[in-house]
Image: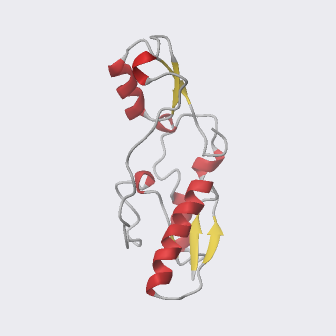
Amino acid sequence: MRVGTRGSRLALKQTEDIIGKLSRISPTKIEKVIVKTSGDKIKDSQLYKIDRKGIFTRELDIAVLEERVDFAVHSLKDVPTEIDENLTIAAVPKRGSPHEVLVSRLDWDELPANSRIGTSSLRREAFCKHYKKEFKLEPLRGNIDTR
């Protein structure tokens, strides 16, 4: 079998987890096929400003439809609410920890009003602004290796 995956460290880790789970059910050899998505190529824009659905999933879906891979692993947050009628979400593994962290030299309560905080998430921006409206939010894009 061939599994389509993005090439980021996080995507590869998620794919390895799925391969491990499938291997416990059936000892089938599964080959990883790395597919570069539009989201991987566009590095200079905040994601919510890009008017395109499936920015991290579309090319993987096409690989499945064209039978270049047998299935693909997506991060569920990247899957559009509507998918191609010829595809199905075949499985959703148990969710890992939903917790996030702030990396700072100071505790959250000690951050000055003009602190610069990097994020690419509208939800995180809203949370930070709600907590302290003077925070300076800076766009932060990239995967684990480039942030």
Scheme by which the image is coloured: secondary structure
Location of the C terminus (image quadrant): top right
Foreground residue among 141 and 19:
19
Percent position of residue 21, x then y:
46, 76
Foreground residue among 1 and 68:
1
Percent position of residue 91, x then y:
37, 71
Percent position of residue 59, x then y:
57, 61
Q: Is residue 86 above or below residue 105?
A: below
Q: Is residue 104 above or below residue 34?
A: above
State which quadrant residue 89 falls in: bottom left
Q: Is residue 33 above or below residue 109?
A: below
Residue found at the far bottom of this picture: 27
Percent position of residue 68, x then y:
61, 76
Residue sitting at x 41%, y 71% = 87
Number of labels in the image equals: 0
**Residue 66 located left or right of residue 86:** right
State which quadrant residue 129 falls in: top left
Residue sitting at x 57%, y 32% = 140
Location of the N terminus (image quadrant): bottom right
Residue sitting at x 45%, y 16% = 135
Residue sitting at x 39%, y 44% = 99
